[in-house]
């Protein structure tokens, strides 16, 4: 599948100016062929194709400031430090902090060649291929969580990661909420009342999905992990819960299944319960009830989708991929509400007398 498109009008930039800055770094003076990746709902990703080399440029949406969700220096630095310890990260080429070039910080990295699998997969994908995808999805996350987090020590805020996340994402939802979506108060209140202690502090990805992974099926291995925008040092089970928010099982209801972005429904892919069990087995961590992490993951994804939906409604982006994000907010929040209503904690305090 071709994930590249001509650059959208709203996302265009002065390629000659960028190339003038990049030329002495890479030793190439000619302008590359420029394309934009259609995927990516937050930061913008472009392909710079030269005759004998292909690079990737990452920048924030036009008009945004260097908040944590769009901090190019942070994203570049995380990957540069991770690369020697976690080889699945792309090679960082250069960071530009001169806003006269493109209007914001941006960076350039090497392209990891391979296959990326999104909602649908080729019909000839074998059972062995699917098994590779499934094993890599779980094993790659366990491997990341085992990296020595001291390489990103300056990103760690110490104990209280779960509390900070619950408070932070609740505030973001309230700030981004538009009048056409639910207030989410029941979910936010439940998360606040039922948060566990941190189980550990490690490097986490923050957006662990199959379509952020690059595979070499010929070599039978995972060769790259992309999109480190939300990476930090934090609780590994919170990272797992966030990953599972994207996971649609084969027997999920049609409404939630409509949000599926990866081939999690295929025979040979683990169910959510199997995903959790396999992760706990490989990592050696314990968790008797995963409900909190699953509800948090769904709520966190709700907030991310709502932030994009608010931008779309305000006309700050015209990307047609965002046209149904308002409905996505309602579906995700409804699923989180369903899980907390089924939880033992909720039932204990809301059972009839």
Image (cartoon, grey):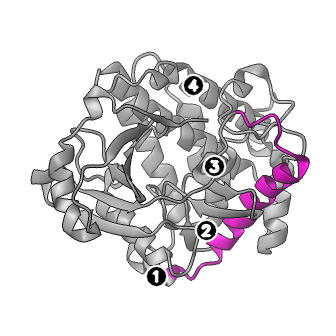
Q: Is residue 242 left or right of residue 135?
A: left
Q: Residue 43 appears at what percent x and percent y?
A: 38, 45
- Contact (Cβ within 8 Å) of mark 4 with mark 3: no
Nearer to us in this view, 63 or 283 = 63
Figure check: 312 above or below 191:
above
- Residue at point 60%, 78% (across, down): 147
Residue 66 in the image: above or below residue 265: below
Q: Which callout, 2 or 3, points at the residue further toward the start of the chain?
A: 2
Percent coordinates x, y for residue 174 in the rendering: 40, 34
Whichever of labels 4 and 3 marks the residue nearer the N terminus, that label is: 3
What is the distance, in whole Å, between disc 2 and disc 4 at their CAs?
Answer: 29 Å
Q: Identify the secondary structure beneath mark 1.
A: helix
Q: Distance between the residues labelled 1 and 2?
A: 20 Å
SS for dot 3? loop
Residue 151, numbered circle: 1
User: Residue sitting at 55 percent across and 71 percent down?
Assistant: 203
Predominant secondary structure in magenta? helix
């Amino acid at each position: 599948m071709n994930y590249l498109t001509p650059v959208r009008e709203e996302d265009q930039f002065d390629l000659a100016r960028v190339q003038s800055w990049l030329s002495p770094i890479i030793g190439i003076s000619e302008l590359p062929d420029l394309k934009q990746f259609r995927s990516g709902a937050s930061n913008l990703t472009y392909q710079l194709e030269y005759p004998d080399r292909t690079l990737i440029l990452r920048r924030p949406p036009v008009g945004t400031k260097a908040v944590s969700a769009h901090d190019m220096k942070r994203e570049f630095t995380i990957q540069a430090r991770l690369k020697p310890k976690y080889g699945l990260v792309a090679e960082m080429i250069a960071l530009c902090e001169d806003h006269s070039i493109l209007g914001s910080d941006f960076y350039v990295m090497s392209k990891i060649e391979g296959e990326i699998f999104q909602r649908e997969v080729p019909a000839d994908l074998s059972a062995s291929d699917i098994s590779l995808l499934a094993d890599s999805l779980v094993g790659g996350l366990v491997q990341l969580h085992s990296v020595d987090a001291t390489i990103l020590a300056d990103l760690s805020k110490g104990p209280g990661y779960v509390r900070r996340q619950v408070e932070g994402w609740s505030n973001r939802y309230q700030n981004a909420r538009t009048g056409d979506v639910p207030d989410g108060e029941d979910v936010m209140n439940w998360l606040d009342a039922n948060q566990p202690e941190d189980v550990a502090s490690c490097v986490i990805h923050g957006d662990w999905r199959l379509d952020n992974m690059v595979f070499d099926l010929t070599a039978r291995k995972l060769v790259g992990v992309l999109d480190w925008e939300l990476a930090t040092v934090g609780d590994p089970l919170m990272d797992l819960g966030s990953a599972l928010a994207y996971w649609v099982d084969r027997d999920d209801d049609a409404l939630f299944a409509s949000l599926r972005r990866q081939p999690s429904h295929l025979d040979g892919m683990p169910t959510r319960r199997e995903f959790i069990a396999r992760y706990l087995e490989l990592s050696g961590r314990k968790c008797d009830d995963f409900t909190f992490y699953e509800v948090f993951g769904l709520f966190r994804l709700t907030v991310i989708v709502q932030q994009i939906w608010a931008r779309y409604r305000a006309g700050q982006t015209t990307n047609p991929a965002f046209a149904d994000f308002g409905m996505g907010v309602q579906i995700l929040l409804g699923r989180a509400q369903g899980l907390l209503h089924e939880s033992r904690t909720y039932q204990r305090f809301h059972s009839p007398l």
